[in-house]
Image (cartoon, helix red, strand yellow):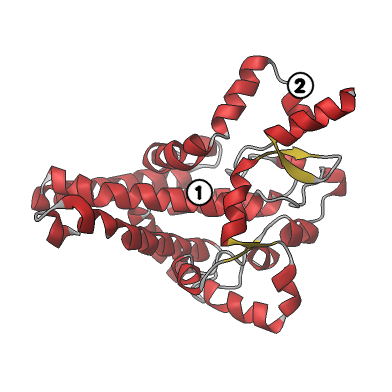
């Protein structure tokens, strides 16, 4: 992209942002495995590779590792939503109990343009710079965030000095924005699907939540490579110490897992309509389905 940007931005330079974003997503998922202590055998190697990669993914490693551990510990628990940076999800009853302006706020939040375009940019460019959700977690999250910010700033200033402000933004801006959107999309599909399992704390089971609260996103081979097999998310939640390069083998050894929560690429495109969890039907529903159910109940 640096080589061709001076000869014209469209179409070649901008189109190259697509595979470049794919490589960045793969780096993020290697950082993800480091956070689980799964990529290398030794913790020190996992932590320092994860911290270096966090500079390129704009994600402070130690902050993210803590938040992601909370996500794994609370997945599918309706009474523990939001503690691990999850996508905000309301039940039908909770939504109907809100005042009008809060309903509008939630509908805006769940709008696909906000969720997958504005939201990812806001999270990775701005929110990741300050670990405000880790105020009581001690000095490590703040040290991680500030050290990551300093390294990012140093690289950005150096690159802008070497190739210019305009070319830098034209090359790296689309890569980061597209990679952020892909990352949020993957996280969404992995936990926001038709028959996802959610339960209150009294009925919540960690293994049930792992197996049925996470999807198996069955992607084509090239996309599996770029996403480092993260689509096999139900297996990952069953045992997060399995590195991404072993997940395919687990699926081959246990083919019955291939039919649990399986979603194809085409099916996943239809999931953007889902916005609420219906505790009575035990499934995710759209706003339209919620309204239809209300009309049927009145009649």
How packed mark 2 is, by other alpha carbons closer than 10 Å (few <14, some 14-19, many 20 or more), is: few
The one nearer the camera, 108 or 254, is 108
Residue at the location (9% across, 54% down)?
A: 6
- The percent coordinates of residue 104 (x first, y second) are 60, 22
Residue at the location (52% across, 39% down)?
A: 112
Q: Is residue 229 above or below residue 103?
A: below
- The percent coordinates of residue 290 (x first, y second) are 75, 32
- The percent coordinates of residue 195 (x first, y second) are 76, 52
Instruction: State which quarter of the image contains the C terminus.
Output: top right
Give the residue at mark 2: 97
Labelled disc at residue 184: 1
How packed mark 1 is, by other alpha carbons closer than 10 Å (few <14, some 14-19, many 20 or more), is: some
The one nearer the camera, 23 or 13, is 13
Residue at the location (71% across, 20% down)?
A: 98
Instruction: State which quarter of the image contains the N terminus.
Output: bottom left
- Would residue 121 be found to the left or right of residue 267 on screen? left
Separation of residues labelled 1 and 2 (CA atoms): 28 Å
- Would residue 215 be found to the left or right of residue 223 on screen? right
- Would residue 159 be found to the left or right of residue 271 on screen? left
| Circles 1 and 2: CB atoms closer than 8 Å | no
Residue 219: quadrant of the picture: bottom right
Residue at the location (61% across, 70% down)?
A: 241
Q: Residue furthest front?
A: 299
Labelled disc at residue 92: none
Would residue 95 be visible to someone looking at this image?
yes
- Mark 1 vs mark 2: which is more N-terminal? 2
The one nearer the camera, 92 or 76, is 92
Would residue 68 be visible to someone looking at this image?
no
Q: How many marks?
A: 2
Q: Secondary structure at mark 2?
A: loop
Q: Secondary structure at mark 1?
A: helix
């Amino acid at each position: 992209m640096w080589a061709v940007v001076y000869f014209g931005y469209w179409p070649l330079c901008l189109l190259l942002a697509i595979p470049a974003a794919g490589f960045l997503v793969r780096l993020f998922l290697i950082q993800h495995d480091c956070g689980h202590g799964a990529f290398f055998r030794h913790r020190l190697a996992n932590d320092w590779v994860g911290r270096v990669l966090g500079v390129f993914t704009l994600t402070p490693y130690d902050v993210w590792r803590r938040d992601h551990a909370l996500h794994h510990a609370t997945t599918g628990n309706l009474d523990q939503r939001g503690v691990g940076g999850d996508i905000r999800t309301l039940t039908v009853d909770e939504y109907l109990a809100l005042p009008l302006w809060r309903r509008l706020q939630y509908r805006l939040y769940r709008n696909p343009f906000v969720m997958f375009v504005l939201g990812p940019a806001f999270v990775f460019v701005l929110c990741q710079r300050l670990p405000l959700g880790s105020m009581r977690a001690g000095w490590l999250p703040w040290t991680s965030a500030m050290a990551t910010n300093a390294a990012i700033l140093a690289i950005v200033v150096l690159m802008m000095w070497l190739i210019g402000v305009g070319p830098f933004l034209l090359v790296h801006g689309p890569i980061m924005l597209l990679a952020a959107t892909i990352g949020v999309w993957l996280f969404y599909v992995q936990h926001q699907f038709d028959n996802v399992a959610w339960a209150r704390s009294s009925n919540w089971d960690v293994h049930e939540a792992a197996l049925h609260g996470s999807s198996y996103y069955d992607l084509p081979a090239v996309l599996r490579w770029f996403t480092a097999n993260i689509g096999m998310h139900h297996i990952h939640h069953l045992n997060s110490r399995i590195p991404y390069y072993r997940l395919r083998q687990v699926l081959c050894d246990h083919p019955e897992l291939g039919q649990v929560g399986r979603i194809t690429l085409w099916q996943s495109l239809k999931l953007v309509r889902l916005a609420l969890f219906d505790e009575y039907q035990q499934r995710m529903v759209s706003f339209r389905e919620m309204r239809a159910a209300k009309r049927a109940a009145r009649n």
